[in-house]
Amino acid sequence: MTPYEIATIDGDGIGPEVCQSTITVLREACGERLRFTSYDGGAAHYAKTGAVLPEDTYAACRQSHAILHGAAGLPGITYPDGTEVGNDLHLQLRFKLDLYANVRPIRLYRGAKSPLAGWQPGQIDYVIVRENTEGLYASRGAGVNLRGELATDTLVVTRKGVERVARFSFELARRRKGAPRDGKHRVTVCDKANILRSYAFFRAVCDEVARSFPDVEIDYAYADAITVHMLKKPDFYDVIVAENMFGDIISDLGAGTVGGLGIAASAEVGDTHGLFQGAHGSAPDIAGQNLASPVATILSGAMMLRWLAERHGDAALNADADRVEQAVEAVLAQGETVPRDLGGNASCSGMTEAICRALR
Ligand code: IPM
Ligand code: MN
């Protein structure tokens, strides 16, 4: 069987450690069925060469079956307008490969205590689907800065953009087992339809899409209010769909409710390509010291296996994804090898070895 080609980009900060750790775990889980090839990119690469996403890296990403990435970005490396260069690796891949759905599961694992009192594993289990190609971030690099006196960025919402991410969300809700609280298949539309036309339009298009999914309940929450609901009734949620920037913000909040960014997986997918990396940044303060948790990237790797499995009708990869997730959860639940951000003192390599052992 020809292996799946996976383009990997280590990136900056803790990127190389967590990316290499994930490759080790995925090799353990899938053997020779994945072939990893490493490519350059990120802020440090930009400082050296002037390219944050080099042409050959982009070409490889376009041609591969999937893309696995560590993290990119270094604080001092900015454009003249003050924005960070490293993020462009990621943003350009999103825009150029049209990765319109950013899927961020918020799930409480055994062994990862929630800072919210009283919630058990199984009671917090929902998915945030962040629109990933438009919204406010569509203005990246294109906002106006007039004479250094005025700056604007424009929020962009298109019918096509909302339709496809809404449909993606309803289809996802249909396949899931429903909200932990009541088992209802539910899509919550997160917006500020009460204030801005762009968000009222976002909601109206979601309503139109919802008509084709009578088996899935549609629900609405304003972006400000949902920050409270996510803390007080997290079991109510099944799938939440949100505009790009709101999705960025609430997915970090959601991660915080289940242990933090170190456990927050992320999959960015379109109709033809998929990019997988943890939702966290490059954490330069702890880079290169074997301190970072690889868990978010490993769980993103499991999402990659699931996405490949579905695209290629490969049930074995689905089983491998289950095994990787179960191995991570078993290690966390066992309580001996726990990453620092979850209250333990395991190193990046220690976590990697423990997860590989659990897989065996
Ligand atoms: C994320 C990050 C990104 C974002 C960066 C890396 C471009 O914060 O994936 O959530 O702002 O979208
Ligand atoms: Mn973010």
Image: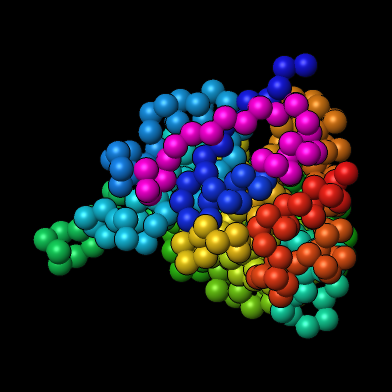
Magenta part of the chain:
23-45
Residue 10, can we see it?
A: yes
| Residue at image coords 45%, 31% | 57
293 relative to 124 in the view: left or right: left
- Is 38 inside the magenta-drawn segment? yes
179 relative to 133 in the view: left or right: right
Quarter the C terminus occupies? top right
Picture coordinates of residue 84, whole percent (x, y): 35, 56
Instruction: Residue lying at the far left in this picture: please name it.
Output: 147
166 relative to 243 in the view: left or right: right
| Residue at image coords 74%, 80% | 116
Compare residues 264 and 162 and report the one nearer the observer: 264
Picture coordinates of residue 281, whole percent (x, y): 51, 58
The colour scheme used to paint the residues is rainbow
Residue 258, can we see it?
A: no
Compare residues 156 and 247 and report the one nearer the observer: 247
Quarter the N terminus occupies? top right
74 relative to 213 in the view: left or right: left
Picture coordinates of residue 291, whole percent (x, y): 60, 64
Picture coordinates of residue 185, whole percent (x, y): 81, 54
| Residue at image coords 58%, 56% | 279
What is the quadrant of residue 6 in the picture? top right
Instruction: Residue lying at the far top in this picture: please name it.
Output: 1
- Is 345 inside the magenta-drawn segment? no
Compare residues 39 and 180 and report the one nearer the observer: 39
Q: Considering only vertical position in the picture, is 127 above or below 22?
A: below
| Helix, strand or loop for the magenta stretch, by majority | helix
Q: How many marks?
A: 0
Q: Considering only vertical position in the picture, is 269 above or below 187?
A: above
Q: Considering only vertical position in the picture, is 225 above or below 170?
A: below
Instruction: Residue lying at the far bottom in this picture: please name it.
Output: 117
| Residue at image coords 55%, 74% | 224
